[in-house]
Amino acid sequence: MSVLDVSDLEVYYETETAPAQAVDGVSFTIEEGENLGIVGESGCGKTTLAKAIIGILPDEGYVNNGSIEFEGEDLTEMSDAERRRHKWEEISMIAQSAMNALDPVYTIREQIVEAIETHRPGTGRTEANEIVAEMFDLVGLDPERADDYPHQFSGGMRQRAMIAMALALEPSLVLADEPTTALDVIMQDQILKRIGEIQSDINSSMMVITHDVSVVAETCDRVIVMYAGKIAEEGPVEEIFGNPYHPYTIGLKRAFPNIRESDQDLLSIAGYPPELTDPPSGCRFAERCPMATTECRTTEPEPHHQGDLRTYCHYADEIDDGFRSRADDPETWRDTEAARSARTAAEVND
Amino acid sequence: MSKASFVVRRLLQLGVTFWAVGTVLFFLFRLMPGDPTAFVVSAQMTPEARQQVIESYGLNEPLYVQYMRFLENALTLNFGQSFHTNQPVREVIWTYLPNTLVLMLSAFVVAYILGIVLGVLTGWYRGSRFEKTTVVTALTARSLPTFYVGLIVLWLFGATLGVIPMSGMGAAGQTYDSFWARIFTLDFLHHLAAPAAVLAFYYMGYPLLIMRSSMMEVLSQDFIDVCRAKGLSERAIMFKHAARNALLPIITAAAIALGYAVGGSVLIETVFGWPGLGREMVNAVLRRDFPVAQGTFMVLAATIIILNFVADLLYGYLDPRVTYE
């Protein structure tokens, strides 16, 4: 059985005009022990998705439709109290910002013990302290420093403390939202390795949200590429980055420098994601896609399955008829509507 | 720097501040127009008798000698005798200060407890009707002068409904063994209720509005999301985490506001005929009663200075990030 089975999930935010459809019809599963990456540019619904799963949407956010099944139980149907019991014990999170994710006025120990005592009321002080010491050891922090306040830790240490707290109750699923964004690459590497080790120890699954493709490549088994609240493409890491079918994935991949082909032209995807209060009726990427046709602008694409890859593009089946080579060429991307208007704007400014 | 050396250094600063305030007060009153002896020395006195009185107060000596004597006496908390009643200033302060403190502190405690709790709730339930009504009420309370509200209260509850006394601290003719015996009587509480309520209503708006905006700032921080993700109860998040963090700016504000409250007691004491230090201070200035004016002003300055010091210490205790440097 999957640890997590999200189906047809819609998460909306109330705004003064129409609701913003931040997550729209997203379906995926996470298997036991599996690591799933979610990539996409800012504002594409990654964080909203994670907040909906763990149950911490802000007041104006709500699940409009769909289900989030955790080990067979639908989280969206649960009462608040039931839901609260699942939090941290079953699904925990490593928050986005290492700097502000811990309460500044309590020691790290107090904050970890608080999580333990909330979910396991019978736990004695000694036992809770043992867990703290053990977790500190696991993440590579000196257990003696558990009585420090967050501000006495460096950024890297804080992130380790956050990870220690997230894994203290050995949850089945950990949501890591940009777990290493605040860290330098060396620290990032160490921390990702450490998370991986602990995770295989306690056999938990993880959902890693990031816009850094290298983090996904290092930690994940499968990847979902999100665009404007929808899944653009989903599949195993090697296939998504080796042999993608969706023009957005291809563009995204080519927007990151490749160490083996360092003289390669970097590509930029001109324009911005669409307004989510009034999303386009066809493919959401059509406006910025150099290959878009009338069909793309009017009809929503059905998923195209190719091996383990799931692609939401009308032309996924024509990928080898010159479609991929066109999408892989930076020149093609200079020829979109958005790219042309960006150039015109730049010239006017000159 | 250690906490101990921080305290010592701040205490030294405190001494310097007191000296500066004392000096300013000393010269300020002597620069004011008007002859201080006019009230004590009667017009029927012979010039010799008059001179004698002036000498007995030390007013014939050069200013710097007077100043040195003032400093010397101030060290032993001796502010001289009232020109008006011949009572030692210390006694005058001792008579009136407790009355002011009882009134101010009871109003203050009520105002800050209510203000902080309402601030937490309005910050938490942002956008609700409860929040909007409370904020409008708080702003109104802040904008209405206390003497105005005081007069309306006196007119409505005192003159019209007759449920509160019109003036003073107790029924006429009552005597008590001590200050404490007096303030624990129903009669005293009956007199205290109206002025304290009017003041509390006025003071409440400040902590409420600070707490509300401080709460909203704290609630937008990432650690609140983590608290929610940890499955903590709503109450634990609201009070243990959000309010605890939001409380920090209130501490300094409260200490300073309390200092000013003791000084700002003049209006309310006048309206409700409350025999407090504020009223006495105004009278002393009007009578050119230097020693009493100096003494009462010193007490007010000391309240503000000492409370600031207490706020500094409290802040270090409440916020582990504060270092003593």
Image (cartoon, coloured by chain):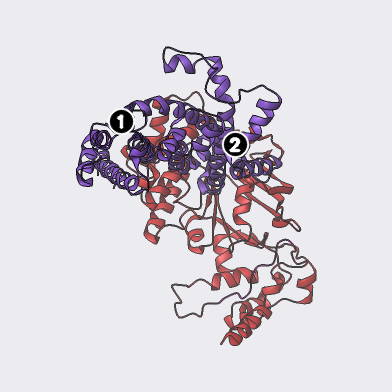
Q: Position of residue A255 (x, y in %)?
A: 54, 73
Q: Colour of chain A?
A: red
Q: Which quadrant: the N terminus of chain A? A: top right
Q: Which chain is purple?
A: B
Q: Residues within 10 Å of mark 1 (few under 14, many from 20)?
A: many
In front of the other: B273 or A177: B273
In front of the other: A287 or B194: B194
Span highlighted in magenta in the image: A267-277
Q: Secondary structure at mark 2?
A: helix
Q: Position of residue A8 (x, y in %)?
A: 73, 51
Q: Secondary structure at mark 1?
A: loop
Residue A245: which quarter of the image? bottom right
Answer with left or right where residue B274 lies relative to residue A190. Answer: right
Answer with left or right where residue A333 lies relative to residue B273. Answer: right
Residue B118 numbered tag? 2
Q: Residues within 10 Å of mark 2 (few under 14, many from 20)?
A: many
Residues at marks 2 and 1, CA–CA distance in whole angstroms:
47 Å
Residue B84: which quarter of the image? top left
Residue B122 part of the magenta-drawn span = no
Q: Amino acid at mark 2?
A: Leu
The residue under the point 66% across, 44% down is B136
Can residue A187 be spotted in the picture? yes
